[in-house]
Amino acid sequence: MKKSIVPLVAGAALAVSAVSASAATLDDVKAKGSVQCGVSQGLPGFSNPDSQGNWTGLDVDTCKAIAAAIFGNADAAKFTPLSAKERFTALQSGEVDVLTRNTTWTMSRDTDLGLNFTGVNYYDGQGFMVPKDLGVSSALELSGASVCTNTGTTTELNVADYFRSHDMDYEVVAFEKADEVVAAYDAGRCDVYTTDQSGLYAQKLKLTNPDDHVILPEIISKEPLGPAVRQGDDQWFNVVKWTLFALINAEELGVTQDNVDEMKNSDNPSIKRLLGTEGSFGESIGLDKEWAVNAIKAVGNYGEMFNRNVGPDTELGIDRGLNKLWSDGGLQYAPPVR
Amino acid sequence: MAAQDVLPSRKGSSGFSALNDQRVRGVIFQVLLIVAIVSFAWWIIHNTAANLRAQGIGFGFGILRDSAGFQINQTLIDYQETSSYVRVYFVGLLNTLLVSFIGVILATIIGFIVGISRLSKNWVVAKAAYVYIEVLRNIPLLLQIFIWYFAVLRLLPAKRDAIDLGPFGLLNIAGWYAPNPVLGRGFALVAAAFIIGIVATFVLRAWARRRQMATGQIFPLFRVALALIIGLPLVAYFVAGFAFANPPFSLEYPTPGNFGPRGGLRVFPEFIGLLMALSFYTASFIAEIVRAGILAVPNGQTEASYSLGLRPGHTLRLVVIPQAMRVIIPPLTSQYLNLTKNSSLAVAIAYPDLVSVFAGTALNQTGRAVEFILITMATYLTISLVTSLFMNWYNRSVALVER
Ligand SMILES: N[C@@H](CCC(=O)N[C@@H](CS)C(=O)NCC(=O)O)C(=O)O
C-alpha cells in the first residue's frame, strides 16, 4: 500500500539524507526535464484524469503553466495524485516539487509544516451539501446530523468549530479518499457532505442523481487554495509564485492564449515587460525571456483557465465570484511585473 | 584469568593472550557492536532533527498536549474536540484493540468451524468449506473491507427509517442503536451480589468435586450455580430498587430524532464492516491451520478413541483437538498478529482506529510525521509482542509434557 508508506519513506529520507533537500529545486527540475506536481486523486474541474487518462483542471493547468514557463512545454508537467492526508509529507520529502492540490493556505501549514504558499489560485470557502428530500434549507438546521468528510483537511476542523460554536450535535464520518466520501454519502450513510464549496460542486457530479442534492447557502470558512512549495528555496518559490502572477496579470492586461503572439508587438510597457520584449524579468527568476509567453500559450490567462475548467459554461458551473479580478470587484490581484 | 589457564607459559604478555581468548574477544565484539548501534541511533536522531530544522519543520513531542480540534465518532473513553492528541492516541488505540480483540475471537470460532468442516465426511459440507477458504483468502483484504462495508450500507434501511429489533433496539444504515445500559444508585449492590455468586460457585464446585471423589455422590452444581449467579443479583436488584426507590439498572432505548434515531448504544457500520471483513478473511487462514493441525494427529489416536467407545464428537473434542492444538497454536499466533495489523486498513472505511486518527488525522493536522509514526510503530510492536508472549505462554501450557 503506497499511501501508508509515504510518511515512512519521508521519515527515512529525513533520517539518513546527509544534507537537507533545501537545495535548488529549479536545477533539479531542469536536470530531470519535468516538474512533478502533487494533485488530488480526482476532483472534476481541479485535477481529474479525462477518459484518455490526461489530467485536466485548474490545479493541473497551474502545474502545466509552471512547466511551460520553465521548459516552454506544458507536457513537462507530471502528476502525482495524493490524498489530503498524504500531500504534505509527499512535498516535504521531495516526492513532488510543488503541490497544486486544492490546498488551503493556513498559518500552521505555512510555518510549522515547512511549506510556503505561493499565492491563491482559487478563493474558496467551506460549504454543505444535503439531499433535497431532507427538507433542510440552512446549515443551522443540521443539529443531530451525520457529516461525511475527508480526513486530514481543514474541513474536519472547521466543521467541528462550526457545530460546536452553534451548540449543535453532530457525528463526523471521516474517510481518507474523496471517492469513499462520495460513495458513503451517496449510499445515505451521512445526511451531509461537507468540503470546500468548489469541491461540493465537483463531487456532486459523481453522485447517482446529482439533481437530488442541494448545496446550502452558508459558507463557514475561508479557504484560500493555492500552490505550495518547500521552505528554504527562494528561487523555486519565485518561479511558482510569479508564474501564477503572470497568468493573473495577463488577464488584467487582456493577453490571452490566442493573442499572446501579437501582443508582443503591443506598445503597452506593462505588456512588454510581462511578455519579455522589455527588461529581463524571466532571467531574474532563472528562466528565459519567453517564460510568461509560454505559460499563457499553454493554459491561457487566469480567466481563461478558470472558465475552461470550472466556469459557468462547464458542468461545474461555478460563478467567478470572489475569483474575479480586483478590478471587477473580486479578490484576484497580482503584483506588477516591474 | 582464563588466558593464564590456557597458556600458562606466556604470563609476561597477557595483553596478547587476552586477545586470543574467545570469551574476551566475544565481549570486545559485543561492546563494539553496541557502540556501533548506539552511535548509529544517535546519528539517525541527530540527523533527523537537524534535517527537519533545516527544512523549517517543527520537531518535538510537546505538541501531543495541544488540543486536537476534530471529532471522532466512536470513542470508548470520553473525548471532545478540545481534548489533546494524547487522548486521540488512546481513543485510537482502544478502537484498534476493540476491533482486533473481537475479530480474533470471531475469526477463531469461524476458522475452527470451517477447518473442521473441511474434513467432514459430508461432501457438501467439505466442499462448501473448501470454496469458502479458496475464495476468501485469495481476494485482497482491502477489497473485502469495501465489499462488506458497502454491502452493510446497501442492505440497511435509510437513516430516517429503521428495522425495529424490539428489545434489541433499532438498526439502520447509520448502525445499530442498541439499548444503552444505565446504572442507577443501587447498582453496586447488584454487582457485589453477582461477584459473591460467582465466588460461591467456585467454592461450591471445589467442595462438590472433593465429595464426588470421596463418596461418588454427584452434586447438582449447575442448578445451584444458576441460583447463585442469577438469583442472588436478582434479589439484590429488587432490594436495591426498593431501598433507593429507583431501578439499579435500566435500559435506555433510542428515540426518534429529525435525522434518524438518537441515543442508545451505537454500533457503527464502519465497525461492523471492518469486523466482518477481518474475521471472515482471517478465518480462512485459520481454517487451513486447523485442518493441518487435525491431520497431524495420527489416525491411530482416533481409532484408539473409537475402540474405547467414544463417540465421534467426543473423540474430536477430547482426543484430537487437544493434540492438534500443539500444531495449531504457533501459526495461529501469527494470524492473530496479522489481524491486528490488518485492522489498520480501517481508514479506508472511516473506522477511527489508531492509524486512522493518530498516524492519520492527527499526524496530518500537525504535520509531525516523524513523531507520530514513531509512536505508532512502537505501539504496534508492543501489541504484537504482548500477543506473542501470551500465545507462547498458552502454547507451553498445552505442549506435550515429557516425563
Ligand atoms: N482545502 C481543504 C480540503 C482539501 C481536500 O482534500 N478536499 C477533498 C474534498 S473536495 C479533496 O480534494 N478530495 C479529492 C481527492 O482526494 O482526490 C484543505 O486544504 O485541507
Image (cartoon, coloured by chain):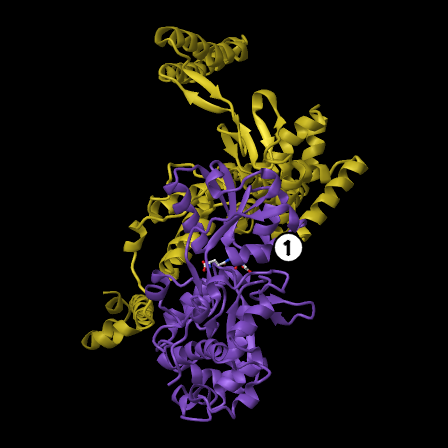
The kind of residue on which mark 1 rests is: Lys
Camera-side residue of B210 and A322: A322
Residue at left offset 59%, top offset 55%: A203
**Residue B26: in sight, yes or no?**
no
Camera-side residue of B30 and A247: A247
Residue A108 placed where, x, y %?
34, 61
Horizontally, is B329 left or right of B297 in the view? left
Residue at left offset 48%, top offset 67%: A324
Query: Looking at the rendering, in which quadrant would you find the N terminus of chain B?
Result: bottom left
Q: Is residue B403 above or below residue A70?
A: above
Q: Is residue B180 above or below residue B98?
A: above
Residue B242 occupies quadrant:
top left
Determine whether the residue tagged by mark 1 lies in a helix, strand or loop. Answer: loop
| Chain B, hue in figure | yellow
Label 1 crowd (10 A; few <14 / some 14-19 / many >=20): some
Camera-side residue of B28 and B227: B227
Horizontally, is B179 left or right of B77 in the view? right
- Outermost residue to the right: B123
Residue A206 placed where, x, y %?
64, 55
Instruction: Identify by letter the chain in purple.
Output: A
Residue at left offset 52%, top offset 91%: A264
Q: Which residue is mark 1?
A: A206
Q: Chain of mark 1?
A: A
Residue A23 placed where, x, y %?
37, 81
Residue B163 occupies quadrant:
top right
**Residue A113: in sight, yes or no?**
yes
Residue A60 placed where, x, y %?
55, 71
Camera-side residue of B37 and B318: B37
Horizontally, is B294 left or right of A88 in the view? right
Count all numbered tags in the image, as a single digit: 1
Q: Is mark 1 within 8 Å of ligand 1?
A: no
Q: Is residue B27 above or below residue B307?
A: below
